[in-house]
Amino acid sequence: MTRGKFITLEGMDGAGKSTHLEWLPAFIEARGVKVVQTREPGGTPVGEKLREMLLDKSQGLHADTEALLMFAARREHIAKVIEPALRRGTWVLCDRFTDATFAYQSAGSGLAWERIEALERWVHGELQPDLTLYFDVSSEVGKARTSAVREPDRFEREGRSFFDRVREGYLRRAREHPLRMCVINGAQRLEVVRQHVESIVLSHCF
Ligand code: TMP
């Protein structure tokens, strides 16, 4: 049995991930593979409970607590959903993964990069995405898009300078992992972004 491919989508809030998650699973399945679509934080019953706590805007959390809860949810997600699917040959399409913890909890909230690296090694050292699609937009574009469509969650309420740092964090990860992480200009027209995503997925995964 050929192992499935693990694809993650990343980007700051408003970068366009959700829009592209609407068509991408069918695009991959049309090529004859099964796809499981999932998300972080979340993806398991425990993970979804942790997600509620993490996004709850009525309570602030220490950056350490946030990072540890993200990795607790992730451990569960890998053990119960991601690894079993990949082993049965199913592809996993995951809305955010560890790059988000580097971008948000380290670059955004100031936790040491090395701390997240240590948690990453502990929780999933051997497992890395085969491909990460990083939708890059400026904080202005991200903010304008999120405030136009929904009530902000705890992270989305952060200011522009937080999101400037989040973007820098993602770009640093992309420089550190150039083969896995593809930077896509998410500010372009939807069809242009879609064509770029299609060509990356076809060339990296098939
Ligand atoms: P979503 O709105 O894309 O579902 O993501 C939920 C929020 O959680 C988003 O604002 C980013 C944040 N987040 C982190 O801060 N660290 C992480 O590791 C992950 C996976 C998400």
Image (cartoon, rainbow, N blue to C red):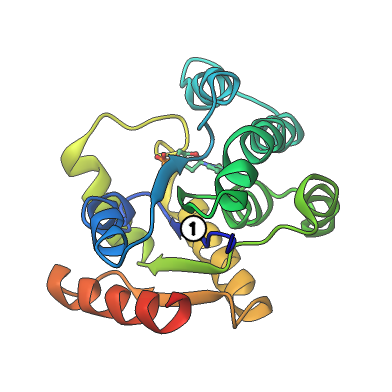
Q: Is 15 located above or below residue 18 in the figure?
A: below
Q: Residue 91 in the image: state x and y as whole percent.
A: 47, 55
Q: Is residue 38 above or below residue 8?
A: above
Q: Is residue 197 left or right of residue 72?
A: left
Residue nearer the viewer, 151 or 5: 5
Looking at the image, the residue that sits furthest to the front is: 1
Task: Look at 21% across and 78% down and name the residue there.
Answer: 195
Q: Which x, y percent locates residue 73?
A: 64, 31
Q: Residue at x 65, y 55 (%)?
A: 102
Q: Quadrant of the N terminus?
A: bottom right
Q: Quadrant of residue 141?
A: bottom left
**Residue assigned mark 1:** 8
Q: Position of residue 169 (x, y in %)?
A: 60, 64
As displayed, is residue 123 above or below residue 20?
Answer: above
Dot 1 amino acid type: Thr
Q: Is residue 176 above or below residue 91?
A: below
Categorize mark 1 by other alpha carbons within 10 Å: few (<14), some (14-19), many (20+). Answer: many
Give the quadrant of the C terminus. Answer: bottom left
